[in-house]
Amino acid sequence: MLLSKAEGKMALGQHVRVFVQSSPARMAVIISVLLFAITVAINPRSLNLNSFSSILLLTLLLSFASAGQTMVLIGGGLDFTVGAVMSCAAILTTYIMGGQDGNLLLVFALAMGMGAAIGLLNGFCAVKIDLPPMIVTMAISNVVTRLSYVLTAGTFSGYAGPAFVESVVGKILGFIPKLTLYALVLVPLVFYLLNRSRFGRQLYLMGNNPTAAQLTGVKVNKIRILMYVFSAMLAAFAGMIGAAYMKTARCQIFDEYAFSSLVAVIVGGTAFTGGIGSFAGSIAGALLMVTLSNGLTVLALTQPVRNLVQGIVMVLLLIMYNRARAVRQ
């Protein structure tokens, strides 16, 4: 009898593990709903339209930052410049706009150019010089941050234009953030790049087996450099949106997104080893992280305790989402 119960528990555990690993995006959504339900049970006042709006807005912002990180991990790389690029783009946005809306197109062009340049540098160092992606992107992230301090002296750099701010934090139907309109353009674009374009097909093949990809005619070095360029450009765009959300910017204001975007992507089912993953999973991972952070905020915990709890939960989630290595032979 005891043996049958033990076998039943083992079978249940195996079923749960198979479910989590076979559909990480769905599991992330389920955990997010449970976390939100727990939050509401502890503090019923957190169940309101403003809470829904805040969670949606922050989820979209983290999803934008995670879009490029998804590409890089699928391709077998790693990008720790996401946060620094976001902060730099936010500073650039608020400095040039100066509280006015007339320079938005100029800001967009400069932010995209800055992101492309940093992504190209990441790709060149990781691919052409063959430096470890983690080390080189962390080093370049540090350089970008120091340059930001030199240019701004560590102070706030200005303000985003009011119309631009409204286009991000304004509400549709009283609770849907207008940022959703940006998502209606960006999300399909990223899905197309990953799932329908030649670049996406070659990216998955390269991430799963670089040697096989090269033998089939894929220009592996070109794809690797492109994934870093796209990652930095998407991070720069997220930084522009973040500037509108915060209304102003300072050095390192979004640096935490380097870690947050990475965890969101992994929790969403993208493998560290490359060749496996999806942007839909990254969006689900972003929702989970934002819901967890919202719950800890509602509990009114101090920042050190919040960081500790969030770190422990993230480690447990990453253990649950452990996946087999991609086939490379």
Image (spheres, rainbow, N blue to C red):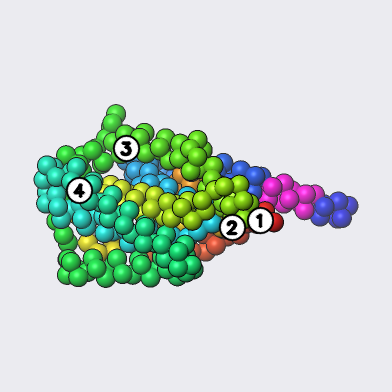
Work out whether mark 2 precedes mark 1 in sequence or the reverse, and give the earlier one.
Answer: 2
Q: Residues within 10 Å of mark 4 (few under 14, many from 20)?
A: many
Q: Residue 7's x, y, as percent?
A: 82, 52
| 4 vs 1, front mark | 1
Q: Residues within 10 Å of mark 3 (few under 14, many from 20)?
A: some
Q: Residue at x 42, y 51 (%)?
A: 226
Point out the stretch of residues depicted in magenta.
8-18
Structural distance between the alpha carbons of marks 2 and 1? 10 Å
Work out whether mark 2 precedes mark 4 in sequence or the reverse, and give the earlier one.
Answer: 4
Q: Amino acid at mark 3?
A: Tyr
Q: Residues within 10 Å of mark 1 (few under 14, many from 20)?
A: some
Work out whether mark 4 precedes mark 3 in sequence or the reverse, and give the earlier one.
Answer: 4
For disc 4, the marked residue is 107
Task: Check whether the beta carbons of the residues at disc 2 and disc 1 lie within 8 A of each other.
Answer: yes
The answer to whether residue 170 is left or right of residue 281 is left
Q: Secondary structure at mark 4?
A: helix
Task: Check whether the beta carbons of the residues at disc 3 and disc 2 lie within 8 A of each other.
Answer: no
For disc 2, the marked residue is 273
Task: Check whether the beta carbons of the residues at disc 2 and disc 4 lie within 8 A of each other.
Answer: no
Work out whether mark 4 precedes mark 1 in sequence or the reverse, and give the earlier one.
Answer: 4
Work out whether mark 3 precedes mark 2 in sequence or the reverse, and give the earlier one.
Answer: 3
Q: Amino acid at mark 2?
A: Thr
Structural distance between the alpha carbons of marks 4 and 3? 16 Å
Structural distance between the alpha carbons of marks 2 and 4? 36 Å
Q: Residue at x 86, y 51 (%)?
A: 4
Q: Secondary structure at mark 2?
A: loop
Q: Residue at x 11, y 51 (%)?
A: 98
| 2 vs 1, front mark | 1
For disc 1, the marked residue is 328
Can residue 216 be seen in this snapshot? yes
Q: Quarter holding the C terminus?
A: bottom right
Q: Amino acid at mark 1?
A: Arg
